[in-house]
Image (spheres, grey):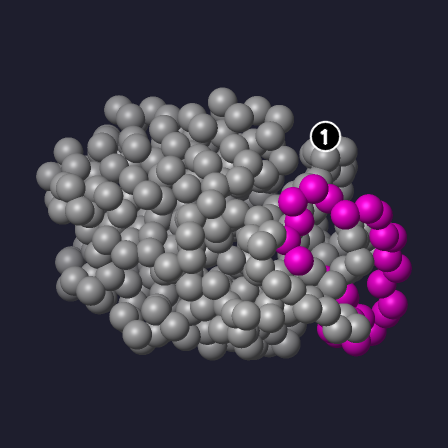
Amino acid sequence: MSKENGKKILITGGCGFIGSNMAAHYLAKGWEVVTYDNYSRPGSKKNATWLEKSAISLQQSNGIGHLRQVRGDVRDLESLQEAMAGVDVVAHMAAQVAVTTSVEDPMEDFLINALGGINILQAARSCGSDPIVLYASTNKVYGGMEHLRVGASTLRYHFIDYPEGIDEDFPIDLHSPYGCSKGACDLYMIDHARIYGLRTVVFRQSCIYGPRQFGIEDQGWVAHFVISAVLGRPLTIYGDGKQVRDVLHVRDLLEAFDLAIDNIKVCAGNAYNLGGGPGNAISLLELIYRLEPELDKAIPLTFEEWRPGDQRVYISDVRKAERDMGWTPRTSIGTGLKDLCEWVKANKELFDVKGIEVKQRKMEHLQPSNV
């Protein structure tokens, strides 16, 4: 493959929701793609099979789309170093993603998120190709934000003093083992740009959603709502349902990755809050009310007590990304939900009801997870 057609990218967590969408995106652009995944997440093996078929189709149709899938764990530095040989870009998507799981096993959470992140940086420093390193962080680095003033209307909460949302200068306040481990890696990424000159970019992501997402209550709540509604599964809302998050379709996130790579001289060493922003903020109840006409049926709900630490509101201020790389969210909530609903309807066989329900019963759900 010529470098004119594309470069080489390593995607950790490459068979997860965001990782598999990213892998397909860069395969279609003619890049050489290496996915690196331990296949521990629900749906990852199904995504791996889908990617393999996509790569074969691209090869047969126009000769592009070279894919190599590596089974590996980010806690294994030697394996990472081997997989990273000769890459132009590293996208670090692999993570332990649930607050609940981090509370149950903080050591495992630390080893995956914090040690795994340091391993990525060590491998990038030693691989010899000076790769751009893109890191999927989380808005959880800003903590619970309990001190902010919040108002309420019939269907949603809203920030009183932050109409544009939370920007990157908002104080870091790490809550939960998950927040601490992701936040540590976030800050290590930024510091490695300062100290070692690595071209790192941190994305503090809000609620990302879209096809290939096997959402459950503990993580991926938009997809969980859609999957449950389409398949007729019961839905439980913890609290009053007015909680608001800004949601971002995965294709808009991929555009941000592209733009960060294209504008790396500006973006290197920076953190960006990436979500749907105020224009794509939605409450749990509002999402349900949008889904009902889309699916042409009522969605029965059960309400339970608030879960500890659940934020009433989180909305990203995305103006820094617009200033530095010309990025803004483009996919409306209506268009994005329709896209996700159509994918779920067309792929009902992908959802292992028994496996997902068993995983859910093992967890005490704390709050909607953002990534």
138 versus 112 height, above or below: below
221 is within the stretch colored magenta:
no
Foreground of the two, 184 or 236:
184
Q: Which residue is mark 1?
A: 362
Residue shown at 36% from the left, 65% from the top: 256
Q: Is 324 located above or below residue 187 in the figure?
A: below
Q: State which region is magenta.
A: 284-312
**18 lies left or right of 35:** right
Q: Position of residue 199 (x, y in %)?
A: 20, 51
Q: Residue at x 20, y 64 (%)?
A: 266
Work out whether residue 247 can be spotted.
no
Image quadrant of residue 69?
top left
How many residues crowd mark 1 within 10 Å: few (<14), some (14–19), many (20+)?
A: few
Q: Is residue 56 left or right of residue 337?
A: left
Picture coordinates of residue 37, whole percent (x, y): 42, 36
Q: Secondary structure at mark 1?
A: loop
Asked if the magenta segment contains residue 289, the reply would be: yes
Q: Quarter of the image containing the N terminus?
A: bottom left
The answer to whether 25 is drawn above or below residue 371 in the figure is below
Q: Where is residue 184 drawn, in percent x and y? A: 38, 38
Residue at figure coordinates x 19%, y 47% from the top left = 193
- Residue sitting nearer the eye, 286 or 56: 286
Give the camera-side residue of 2 and 102.
102
Inspect this view and state whether residue 200 appears: yes
